[in-house]
Amino acid sequence: MVFKKRRRNLKIILLTVLIVLIAVLGWLYYQSEQLKSRADSLLKYGDAVNALASYKKAQSIFPLRWDLSADISGAQLVLKSNQDYDQISEFAELQEPPPLSNLPSAHLAPNELFVPVLMYHHIRKNPMPNNAVWAALNVSPDQLDQQLLYLSLHNYNTITLDELSDALDGKISLLPNSIVITFDDGYRNFYDNAFPLLKKYHMKSVQFVITQVVGIPAYLTWDQIIEMDRSGLVEVGAHTRHHPNLPDLSQSAIIDEIKGSKMDLEQHLKHPVNWFAYPYGSYSPFIMQTVKDAGFKGAASTVYGTNQRKNNLYLFPRIMVDGRFSLDNIARRIQK
């Protein structure tokens, strides 16, 4: 009898402890969520300093909240962008292009199309010409003007990724010398320097946008994105919400970054957004599957190449246009 009474008392104690523990965790989560909501509002109105502090405090209160890592990363990105327009930390998809003497074969396998996809980042005069990374990532407006003029004079036909996908599905036939021009990260200098040149030559392009930095000084505004989308010259794609290195995140955070960026864009553009670009070119089987599950038609990689095929649309290759490339260098890379 005494043993049964002790066991019953032990159960009551354990149950009480469990209830108290759940209550404490619930209270801590509530406090953490309140701080996160405050930080979201602060970030929305441009106060990245206090938003970052609130996100970090929310995470310290409830360390099990892995989802806050992406919010902290996003606030840090916004803070760096606010500090100095010309000293933005580069969130770039770098590529090591092969030398001209060793370019991949352009021989087409069955069901492949030769369609070079060019990749640009900044279109501006390089503010740090002695920095090799910045020299690669910055293409001046004059350079882009010369490159688009070359494409025009040599009868290149700029197409969207939707058109490329339709061609690979056999729905349409592409004109000879079809090419795709993509720009990553959604920088403001795309609107200032590249968009006028696209209108000048009436050429199509694709802009991959980091949705949670839209409106920050170095980046596009929603009004600019909507204007370009409606022009018919700019196909808008997603580049996550905060440009994290996706493989470093939890699965739930990966899903939020990918699906959330699509949702952000579609909410503003009022039509489906079909294309995605992997931040830093980093991916995994889970990340690729999440892109598919989100409803994207495909995703841009940093793999070098010119041949496109239907079964590789979630890892289609591109050619990064290095700011140090001569016009002849680019011309030889896009020749069939």
Image (cartoon, grey):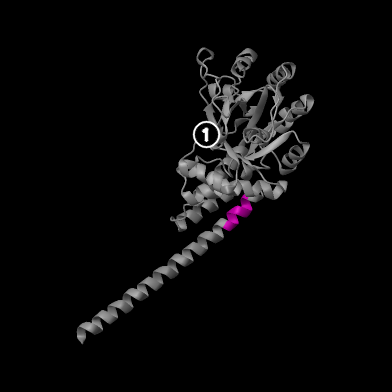
Residue 62 vs 198, above or below: the answer is: below
Q: How many marks?
A: 1
Residue 55 vs 321, above or below: the answer is: below
Residue 79 vs 61, above or below: the answer is: above
Give yes or no for residue 141 being in the magenta stretch.
no
Does residue 303 appear to the left or right of 200 in the view shown? left
Residue 127 appears in the figure: no
Q: Nearer the viewer, residue 93 or 81?
A: 93
Q: Residue furthest bottom?
A: 1
In the image, residue 289 lies at what x, y percent?
A: 51, 45
Q: Quadrant of the N terminus?
A: bottom left
Q: Nearer the viewer, residue 226 or 283?
A: 283
In the image, residue 336 lies at what x, y percent?
A: 61, 18
Which of the 4 image quadrants contains residue 235? top right
Residue stretch in magenta: 37-43
Q: Which residue is mark 1?
A: 281
Q: Main secondary structure of the magenta part?
A: helix
Q: Residue at x 75, y 37 (%)?
A: 228
In the image, residue 293 lies at what x, y percent?
A: 55, 48
Which of the 4 image quadrants contains residue 162? top right
Q: Nearer the viewer, residue 136 or 208?
A: 208
Give yes or no for residue 41 being in the magenta stretch.
yes
Disc 1 residue crowd, few under 14, some 14–19, many 20+, Cα 10 Å: some
Q: Nearer the viewer, residue 305 or 1?
A: 305
Q: Residue at x 76, y 36 (%)?
A: 232
Dot 1: what SS?
A: helix
